[in-house]
Amino acid sequence: MRFRSTGFIHGMGTRLFHTITQPFPMFLCLLLRSKEMKDPKNFTVPLFILFLFVVFAVVGCGSDPGATEKRTTAEGVDTTVDDNDSSGFDADLLFWTPEVEVTRKELSCVEQEYASHVHWGKPHDHFELTQRTTRFTVESFQKLSGNFNCASTDTPGLMIRFGADATNKTLSLAYTFACMQLDENGKGTFAEDEKLYVINMDDSLIEYTSPLPDWQAAEGSAFQNNVLVDKYDNNAFQYIYKKDPGHSIHKLSEINDLITDNELAETDFVEIVPIAEPRIWPKYDQGSEFTMRTCLVAIKTNTRRITDDAPSSPGYRLTDRGTDLGSVCPPLCLGVAFPTIGLAVRKSCN
């Protein structure tokens, strides 16, 4: 989730063009009104200057800040941008392309977003969900995932189903394995396994004893009917999961890398951290289309293996890092999709 911007050059080119060309009309007007211009023979110079101005205008029109153009966000979403929008739109924000690996500071920022954007209650009477640590043992995950198989052309994943405990007003997640058919862009379809798992009192993954419809009627419905999201970052909370039960999917390869890169033992844990992130940042410090998501963090000897420092084992991508984002679809799109880059955190988050 570290930043780089490809929109910077575009912005600098636009400002340079207008700095150069802005004085041209006034200079030409003063020249034409001068005494020397009463002689028709002297019109050659101003006409040449006018010609240069037209050429600059044609070349520079591609960088015209008043133009409306279609651009692509960090997640590949086409967004029509009107730079004359008086709402304070910062077009360069669409080009921030942070990395998928999550540092401690970045995780703290998106945990704060979850606390402020994912609430329990009603649109005009809501509050933060009760927090509790959700984690599963490495041993139980490896045992179950080792017995799960997909076709050789499929990508196996762990689906995290969003549910809630209506009594304690907190999250109550369930898990199932899925086989995904992904294209070269990380998008495609998935088929989930019939077996459903929950986390036992000892933090191990165990099979749910009732069919999936029973869990959906209880924990699943509690989440859909009581959890609201400040979708547009404007303190207007709404039920966004009424029609589509929320979930995220993490590739098994990512979870295995998290375990291996952080040298977790069978008695260690993988923590599922609920977070909230927007689809894009269309304005400075104001996101759009917030949803609940999940970040996975390694827990070694009951301590989060995540830091802002350089990884303690260089060359291992997820050492001392969390893994972001999993699939954000649905509710953002049909099927399944894995972004190759993360999303920028709120600029004011320190």
Image (spheres, rainbow, N blue to C red):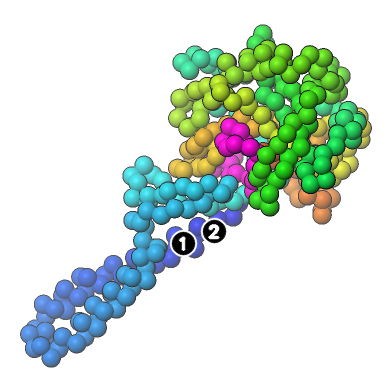
Which element carries disc 2, helix, strand or loop? Answer: loop
The answer to which image quadrant residue 110 occupies is top right
Q: Main SS of the magenta segment?
A: loop
Tally the numbered discs: 2
- Identify which amino acid the numbered label 2 is placed on: Thr
Label 2: few (<14), some (14–19) or many (≥20) C-alpha neighbours in 10 Å: few
Question: Which percent across, then down, holds residue 283?
Answer: 45, 42
Q: Which residues are magenta?
A: 328-350
Whether 174 is drawn above or below 90: the answer is above
Which mark identifies residue 6? Answer: 2
Left or right, 270 with respect to 147, comes to left
Whether 18 is drawn above or below 103: the answer is below
User: Residue, x 81% and y 17% (percent of image)?
Assistant: 208
Is residue 204 covered in magenta?
no
Left or right, 72 with respect to 168, comes to left
Note whether residue 170 is visible.
Answer: no
Which element carries disc 1, helix, strand or loop? Answer: helix
User: Residue, x 52% and y 22% (percent of image)?
Assistant: 239
- Residue tagged 1: 10
- Identify which amino acid the numbered label 1 is placed on: His
Which mark identifies residue 158? Answer: none
User: Residue, x 20% and y 70% (percent of image)?
Assistant: 26
Question: Which percent across, then down, holds residue 215?
Answer: 72, 15
Question: Which percent across, then down, holds residue 108?
Answer: 65, 35
Is residue 330 covered in magenta?
yes
